[in-house]
Image (cartoon, rainbow, N blue to C red):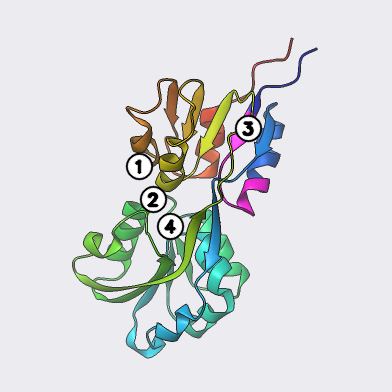
Amino acid sequence: MNASPRVWITRTQPRADITAHHVRDLGWEPVVAPLLEVRSITGAMSAAPSPADLTAVALTSPNTIKAIGSDLLAYKHLPVFAVGDTTAEAARSVGLSDVRSAKGDIHALARLIARDIAHGTVFAPGAREPAGDLPALLPDHQVIRLPVYETCDTGTKAPDNIAAILIHSPRAARLLCTHNIRTGLVVTISEAASAPLKGHFNGEIRTSPTPDEEGVLTTLGNSPSPV
């Protein structure tokens, strides 16, 4: 019997190991080799706005909680809007209580904020290079962005004998384009993550119908049975 087909999991830790567990359950052999790593920006919160001046907090990634976790407790009395369930769970894990999940992408996040809060000032700590433009999506609100972490190229090399690749961000997709991989299967978490691959990758690109882990895994599907 041959070994199960190998899937390259490119996302950052610690989520990469969680994805690997689910991929193994689908019958694939996961290969964890992140293209990016998350680094907190030292002293970032020294420039954070006063909680008294804010209406809400917006979180676009669990990496924000990883970077500044306990610092967010200063905003515990405010509603916290999370882009998806994973980010919402991370926010609750550090003691935030009024956490509302948009269950989608940054566009869904903006819609949820606009629905629940007609106007006001929203604090959005996040990545140095954000995947989307939240201030542009909330023209009736003042959005205060603050970089609290950055994602950096790990310099990892592409693993051998890979049947499929999972991509969880546009930044990872752009890095994948620098590797000499042109065929096979790539499963991406969103259209934004698929876009950089078009014109650079000749294999099959499948885009998750929902921008979350469940959608990625469903799109990957069960592995072909070993023979």
Residue range corresponding to the magenta coloring: 7-17
Comes first in the chain, label 3 or label 2? 2
Which residue is label 1 attached to?
A: 192
The answer to whether the residues at label 3 and label 1 have Cβ atoms under 8 Å apart is no
**Quadrant of the rendering where the C terminus is positioned:** top right
| C-alpha distance separating marks 3 and 1 | 24 Å
Front position in the image: 186 or 176: 176
4 vs 3, front mark: 3
Above or below residue 162? Residue 169 is below
Which residue of the protein is positioned furthest toward the right in this rendering?
1
| C-alpha distance separating marks 4 and 3 | 31 Å
Which residue is label 3 attached to?
A: 159
Above or below residue 221? Residue 209 is below
Front position in the image: 187 or 90: 187
Above or below residue 185? Residue 123 is below
Q: Is residue 211 left or right of residue 26?
A: left
Which residue is label 2 attached to?
A: 105
1 vs 4, front mark: 1
Q: Is residue 53 left or right of residue 91?
A: left
The answer to whether the residues at label 2 and label 4 have Cβ atoms under 8 Å apart is yes
Question: Where is residue 194 drawn, in percent x and y?
Answer: 38, 35
Q: Secondary structure at mark 4?
A: loop
User: Identity of the amino acid at label 3?
Assistant: Pro
User: Identity of the amino acid at label 2?
Assistant: Asp
- Mark 2 neighbour density, 10 Å: few (under 14) some (14–19) many (20 or more): some
The answer to whether the residues at label 1 and label 4 have Cβ atoms under 8 Å apart is no
Which residue is label 4 attached to?
A: 83
Question: Where is residue 49 drawn, in percent x and y?
Answer: 37, 85
